[in-house]
Image: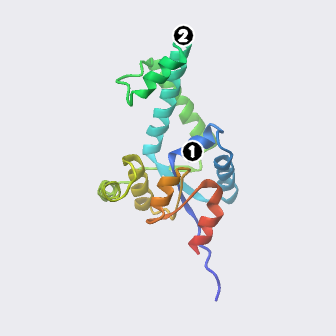
Amino acid sequence: MSKINVVPYLYLDTNVILDAIDNRWQPAVDLMNQIRKESWECCTSRFTVLEILDVKQEEKYIENLLVEGHRLSRVRDLLGIRRQPTRGLKVRELNEIYQQLYDKLSQEYSFINFEHPIDEKLWDKADAYGASTNIGSTDAIHLASAITIGCNILVTRDQDFRAIADDFIIAVLPEDISKGIKRLS
């Protein structure tokens, strides 16, 4: 009996893409290089761009606070407040953040498809995952997106999300992609 080779269709969680584009975690960088080399199809949700923008804007906000001379303890206090009503970033700074992200994604990571799932059941699935598991709303949206889009492997660095998502889709850490692909066949 011959073994069927199933082609991986990867869904990349936000943390994996951030780790790669900021070169902050080598297994994510290695995974991106492997995806390019193997020409694997991969995607994420457009929601990921919003999450990355949020991180980049918060980084700029912190940088501005430090440049303005705020002590690190004050910055920590400000960050302890879950959501700032406004980060006080100038339109120019917001545009720069967006443009830098867009340029990086379109030039170096053009192989990642940023999907716009139109299936109206997406939100019902996200609601169901959020209500029936211990994952947060953003992870519920990512899980519902991965399944709605038709991916067969979800890649995340979030151990808790991975463990829960693995009940619905093969979910692996970036460094365990080969284990996930073996599970496909």
Residue drawn at (49%, 37%), measured in percent from left and top? 52
Instruction: Name the residue that disc number 2 marks.
Output: 69
N-terminal of the pair, mark 1 or mark 2, is 1
**Type of colouring:** rainbow
Q: Left or right: where does residue 101 sit relative to residue 81?
A: right
Instruction: Name the residue that disc number 1 marks.
Output: 17
SS at mark 2 in the image: loop
The outermost residue toward the front is 73
Quarter holding the C terminus? bottom right
Q: Left or right: where does residue 88 sit relative to residue 68?
A: left
Residue drawn at (34%, 56%), measured in percent from left and top? 122
Residue drawn at (68%, 55%), measured in percent from left and top? 34
Give how far across and how far down residue 46 sits, in percent.
44, 45
Q: Left or right: where does residue 175 sit relative to residue 129?
A: right
Distance between the Cα atoms at labels 1 and 2? Answer: 32 Å
The foreground one among 130 and 143 is 130
Q: Residues within 10 Å of mark 1 (few under 14, many from 20)?
A: many
Q: Is residue 182 above or below residue 92?
A: below
Number of numbered discs overlaid on the protein picture: 2
SS at mark 1 in the image: helix
Q: Is residue 70 above or below residue 141?
A: above
The foreground one among 73 and 151 is 73
The outermost residue toward the bottom is 1
Q: Amino acid at mark 2?
A: Gly
Give how far across and how far down residue 8 sits, in percent.
58, 65
Give how far across and how far down residue 151 sits, in percent.
49, 62
Q: Amino acid at mark 1?
A: Ile
Q: Is residue 49 above or below residue 154?
A: above
Give how far across and how far down residue 6 sits, in percent.
58, 72
Q: Residues within 10 Å of mark 2 (few under 14, many from 20)?
A: few
